[in-house]
Amino acid sequence: MIEALRRRPGLRAGALILPATAFLVVFFVAPLFIVLAYSFLERGTYGGVVWAFTLENFRRAFDPLYLRTFLRSAYIAGATTLLTLVLGYPFAYFIATRRPQTRNVLLLALMIPFWTNFLIRTYAWLTILRTNTGLLNAALLSLGLIREPLPLFGNDFAILLGLVYGWFPDMVLPLFAAISRLDPSLLEAARDLYASNRQVFLRVVWPLTLPGVAAGSILVFIPSLGAFITPTLLGGGRSLMIGNIINNQFLAAHDWPFGAALSTIMIGIMLLATIGYLRIVRRQA
Amino acid sequence: MAQECAVELRQVTKRFADVAAVRHMSLEVPDGEFFSLLGPSGCGKTTTLRLIGGFEIPTEGEICIGGEPQGYKPPYQRPVNTVFQNYALFPHMNVYENVAFGLQMQKVPIDEARRRVAEALEMVRLSGLDKRRPNQLSGGQQQRVALARALVNHPKVLLLDEPLGALDLKLRKAMQLELKALQERVGITFVYVTHDQEEALTMSDRIGVMCQGELLQVGTALEVYESPQSRFVADFIGDSNYLAGDVLSVDQGVAEVALAPDVRVRAPAAPDVRQGKRASVTFRPEKMHINAAPDPSSNQLTCVITDVVYTGSTTTYVVAFRDAPRIMVRQINEEVSVGAVASPGDQVTISWPVGVSKAFLEEGAGD
């Protein structure tokens, strides 16, 4: 056996990736197909599924009620992506153009808050934003800057804030990588060829860092689309996203097949986004 | 002034932190000249080019282009274009888009731009490759795109930063002649930075030799090669032999130097060489003779051959004179049948005309 591995490098490589492959098949590929299979089955009375084929779950998913939630989720995820991009690009550019030591310190500073659990950080925002007892409103009220508490909580603003905060590093890191790969002589060449600062950015910097923009956008858009902790805690239970509905179908309504159908549709959307990303990257190469 | 000055540097100094990259540099490049800045890496030649291009601003002094002081003008407001060391072609644009970039930025009408790009591509013999991406081109082709991209803007001065450095030897030699021909055709002033002395000699109307931020000598290829004004220039351009000795006398600009108590040679003296100082006498390997008939206007040394190196067109004899560093004597192999005139171990007399050598003050022996 060992001798055979030694003689055939192909076999050896296969043996080396076998554990990872097995892990992915058991805990990733198989569950994905289970979700896909369940989405075509009928619901059991107390959760679980009845083995009978139906398209009913998908018909229900395209009910205007759920469709509106999908659109809302896509809108919030899209807005989150756009906001992290607008905030993250200058930030990443700044870090990427520092000296190496400064660069590492700034990257570390970006990462440190994220060593704390996501749930705890979201609770922290809750104590800051809460309408009457929140730190921010209380401070503004006591300073006399406002008369009425500002509507900072239990709305889309709070969800967006929580999501932008939560996924900011996922946008900044790919952008940072793309920007630090930029050859500075290209920027000098553009300036030499009469480009203003704005034109240098639009014609050279932006197109060349587009793969980073796409990667960051995917990394932010996908988890934002499926978010359920942030809308639950900061949305005040009213501003629902598709993640909350899926969560409810499995844990509260015991309608596994419908939850599976909604999940399948969401995975489909994510797949399309990823394909879009790959096309952008390929066009660059 | 008969000819307009394309580039003029007046007492330009550039300091980075407390390191002076360029020191009190003054230079005039007349219109239409192919001027090379030659020097070892770190001598300040690229910084000088960046100062002219506006990528750096002088700490002191002034730079004029076409007679106009440039002050703090950024690169895009100067009538110059640059060909960068690694070409810096935009990888996401094809050849046409790369070359048209400068024209688009200047808002040149599209028809005119199209005509000028076609012209520029034809000039560098790249017609038909408009749609290629830079990574689909060979090194030589990329180099031509970079040239076309700069020349299409009709700059007053073209700055070139070691543009041939990345090419292999054969291609580099071909491009040298092509560049020179191109420059003569378009009549644009070229300021060319290189560390390759042969390249500078091949292409330039005049050469400026730089060392440690200072411009040591400016002259034609002939002038800097045949009459170097400092030991560094003699050393950096071409091969040179050195022999150190005490200056016995300086008479009408010719120094008599004692290499040993009983061996004296004569050489035209640099201005700072005076009686009683140490001096090194330099002379070129190819200007020397082996076992020639004695001649009162030549210096003569008796040496022992240590090595004979045959390199095709020439044969180099390495000879030892007492404990002095090795001396090279180069002979052209004019006829096939003539083999080496001497072999290692032979005692020979080497000689060279007094006029082709020069005595410089030994380094570290100044006042």
Image (spheres, grey):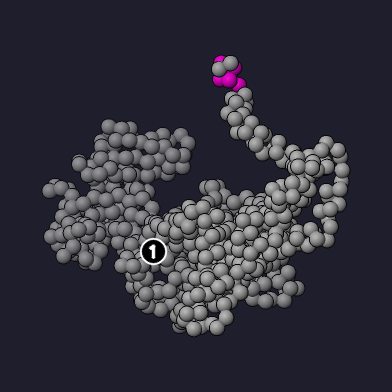
Q: Identify the element where label 1 is drawn.
A: loop
Q: Amino acid at mark 1?
A: Gly
In the rendered image, residue A158 lying in the magenta stretch gets the answer no
Provide residue B251's location: percent of width, then percent of height: 19, 64
Number of numbered discs visible in the structure rendering: 1
On the question of residue B211 being in view, the answer is yes
The crowd level at tag 1 (other Cα within 10 Å; few <14, some 14-19, many 20+) is many
A164 above or below B76?
A: above
Q: Main secondary structure of the magenta part?
A: helix
Q: Is residue A80 left or right of residue B201?
A: right
A46 or B217: nearer the viewer: A46
Which stretch appears magenta? A3-8
State which chain disc 1 sits on: B
Q: Residue at x 28, y 33 (%)?
A: B346
Above or below, B168 relative to B92: above
Q: Residue at x 71, y 47 (%)?
A: A250
Image quadrant in which the C terminus of chain B is located: bottom left
The answer to whether residue B68 is above or below residue A220 is: below
The residue tagged 1 is B44
User: At x 55% / y 17%, what residue is drawn?
Assistant: A2
Q: State which quarter of the image contains the N terminus of chain B.
A: bottom left
Q: Nearer the viewer, residue A193 or A106?
A: A106
Q: Please state the horizontal and vertical placement of residue B315, each as a whole percent of the image.
A: 40, 40
